[in-house]
Amino acid sequence: MSTGALRTDETGKPEVDRSWEPAGDPAGQVAEVRDVVVLGSGPAGLTAAIYTARADLKPLVLEGEPSSTSDQPGGQLMLTTEVENFPGFVDGVMGPELMASFRAQAERFGAEIRTVKATRVDLSSKPFAVWFGDSRSGEPQLRAHALVVATGARSLMLGVPGESRLLGHGLSTCATCDGFFFRGRPIAVVGGGDSALEEAIFLTKFASSVLVIHRRKQLRASKIMQDRAMANPKISFLWDSVVEEVVGDESLRALSVRNVVTGAISEVPVEGCFVAIGHAPSTALFAAQLATDAAGYITTHDGTKTSVDGVFACGDVQDHVYRQAVTAAGSGCMAAIDVERYLESQAHA
Amino acid sequence: MSESTLTLTDTTFDELVKLAGTPVLVDFWAEWCGPCKMIEPILEEIATEKSGALQVARLNVDDNVRTAQRFEVMSIPTLILFKDGEALARIVGAKPKSALLAQIEPHL
């Protein structure tokens, strides 16, 4: 069943408000109009693409741009190794491999994927306006009747002195990329959640020792990850502690750490530091346009509907509770079905 | 990797980088690095577009630890631009094509 009918004109009467069409754009740029544009290409975005592609809505996915952070095509799983809890993979699957499969599956059903990042959206006009590349250009490059927001969440950085200078020189946001370079060296992982422990365990393959620095006395990580980390002889813990400064000239040689209970400051000699202190939703694009909760996550209601009719949100950009690949994929499927129903209702309005 | 891209090793690195008639952009990479894979097609494009003005080369850090250590590579992908054997620019981490070109082009 196709709902591509929005663009046709069966009754001779335009079904879509075309008042947005440029009267005379100086650059001669006319926006390409799509039924569905998906922003983001993690499990949520690509599942939405698979489902809307199968519904013959010819989705266009703006997958993002290469980066060594979690904000990249494929999302956070691109920086992981073995994913052991994605249903269907008895022996686990490598994160990047899983995302390559998601992508290939979406393309198989006709989803179009572009390696660009949306730089601006205007949700006040319909079809919604989307810019990528030069956001200052008057006319958007794209218009979408329905928009799926799946921009995910990005890793938080420490925000302390020395951090940006020593990034790539001992300080890393990607254990799978950089762990190799710390063979036989003492390193630290900052954080207390599942991703912090996963990185710590992974890094014991290379490092001589891994110190997990956590701001509380208790870990936030799941029981199974805690048990594994505690049982690993290379891993030790520094509790109630926060990093105040990343120390080193050419490369990292220590972390300046403050005990949050006693206030005492000490220097911890390590040669590498991996940061896994949590995530923040990537919502800058939608500031003042979509309703969010106090933490900045997009609020959804009745499935994946946002505060703007026709805009749907799925995955980590609207979920700070579950944050799993499988829940992201599930909500991506929900968004696709919500999009389909929305476009149908518009066509028959 | 295409013919337009050179493969370097610990043994051939110095000779090939010095002998090249143009600046050489060396991509330090490894099989297990996701972001490295992501910039691979971009580097291929750059190799084709800048053919004659720039030589793109790759060095696998797993197999060529010595060269990676010599240039203090601690994060991959790392791209280093060499001219007459001398390192002129260094880019750490995967970046979009435009950002790569912005750092490379002033040296060509």
Image (cartoon, coloured by chain):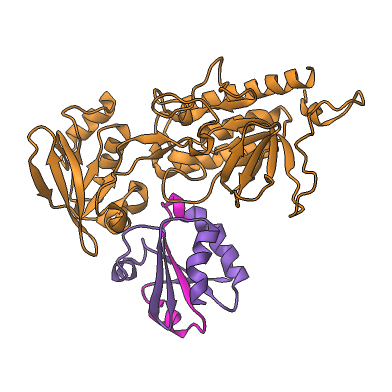
Chain colours: A orange, B purple
Q: Nearer the viewer, residue A240 or A299?
A: A299
Which residue corresponds to the image point at 73% horizontal and 44% vertical from the top-left? Answer: A31
Magenta span: B10-36
In magenta stretch: residue A96:
no
Q: Going by the image, does A339 lie left or right of A322?
A: right
Return the x and y of residue A172 as percentages of the image width and height.
Answer: 31, 51
Q: Going by the image, does A8 lie left or right of B12?
A: right
In magenta stretch: residue B29:
yes
Q: Going by the image, does A314 lie left or right of A278?
A: right
Look at the picture and state if A345 lies above or below B35. Answer: above
Residue A33, picture quadrant: top right
Return the x and y of residue B105 as percentages of the image width and height.
Answer: 52, 71
Image quadrant for the N terminus of chain B? bottom right
**Does the image show residue B6?**
no
Q: Nearer the viewer, residue A82 or A221?
A: A221
Residue A2, picture quadrant: top right
Residue farthest toward the top in the current orientation of the protein = A302
Residue farthest toward the right in the current orientation of the protein = A12
Q: Nearer the viewer, residue A210 or B89?
A: B89
Look at the picture and state if A336 lies above or below A271. Answer: above
Return the x and y of residue A49 as percentages of the image width and height.
Answer: 62, 33
**Does the image show residue A235?**
yes
Return the x and y of residue A310 as percentages of the image width and height.
Answer: 65, 25
Marks counted in the figure total: 0
Which residue corresponds to the image point at 54% horizontal and 45% vertical from the top-left? Answer: A64
Which residue corresponds to the image point at 45% horizontal and 50% vertical from the top-left? Answer: B34
